[in-house]
Image: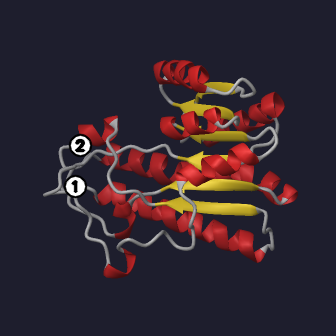
Amino acid sequence: GLQLARRCARLGADVIIWDIQPEACVRALEDVRELAASSSTVVARTVDVTDRERVYAEVERMRLDVGELDVVVLNAGVVSGKHVARADDDAMLRTMDVNALSHFWLVRATLPAMLERNAGQIVTIASASALGGGPGLADYAASKAAAFIFAESVRMEVRKAGKTGVTVTTVCPFFVSTVSASASHTHTARDATPSLPASHRGAPCGEARLTAGRAARRAARRSAPRAAGHV
């Protein structure tokens, strides 16, 4: 999320960053502002994306502050890395809330305006584990599979509505070195490599052909773009 925020800011987009940790918001704001183009506005807000009423309120606040959003990146994620027999109930519920259900709230808050303008893009950061799972990833893989199918369904709804200016992109990266991934003892080549179906190896998710980098460049090409996402 932070890398994408940096890329968008460098290319001249207005960037809104959400994180549940106030300290992370401050660090991200300083980091991205330092790299941003002179024309960019960079905002960081402390938001719990599982709180749908807060999500709805923050989206309205963003509209007042910077206008409608052009690109929304659904990137918030947590992982426990525990086998399902030893996993904590609350941690599993949290994984589903953050990694999957939060997407419902932000898409519901932002997609209607995109459809009305027939312009905009929603980017879902899913995971290769959504396509095959892995030991110690039962809740995480299930949440990412839910995010993947949710995004694909939204993409089909947008297509059926004939809104050719609205794009729904799904990215399924392999393991990425992050704080949450480092905290998971199962993220090793031996234990946690997903078993991908042959039909999915090396293939993009569904019909989403854009990478996160291309999404950033697309945002920057727009006039006074606004990109929002989770770190």
Tell me where residue 208 appears, x and y as whole percent.
57, 67
Task: From the image, tell me which residue sits under label 2.
Answer: 184
**Helix, strand or loop status at disc 2:** loop
| Total count of labels | 2
From the viewer's side, name the closer residue of 108 and 200: 200
Kindly tell me whether residue 109 is visible in this rendering.
Answer: no
Q: What residue sits 80% from the left and 68% below the top?
A: 163
Q: Residues within 10 Å of mark 2 (few under 14, many from 20)?
A: some
Determine the CA span between mark 1 and mark 2: 9 Å
Tell me where residue 199 appears, x and y as whole percent.
37, 81
Q: Quadrant of residue 180?
A: top left
Q: What residue sits 54% from the left and 52% below the top?
A: 212
From the viewer's side, name the closer residue of 213 and 100: 213
Tell me where residue 105 appears, x and y as whole percent.
63, 49
Q: Is residue 225 above or below residue 127?
A: above
Mark seen at residue 136: 1
**Helix, strand or loop status at disc 1:** loop
Q: Is residue 80 above or below residue 43?
A: below
Q: Amino acid at mark 1?
A: Gly
Mark seen at residue 155: none
Horizontally, residue 8 falls left or right of residue 162, namely: left
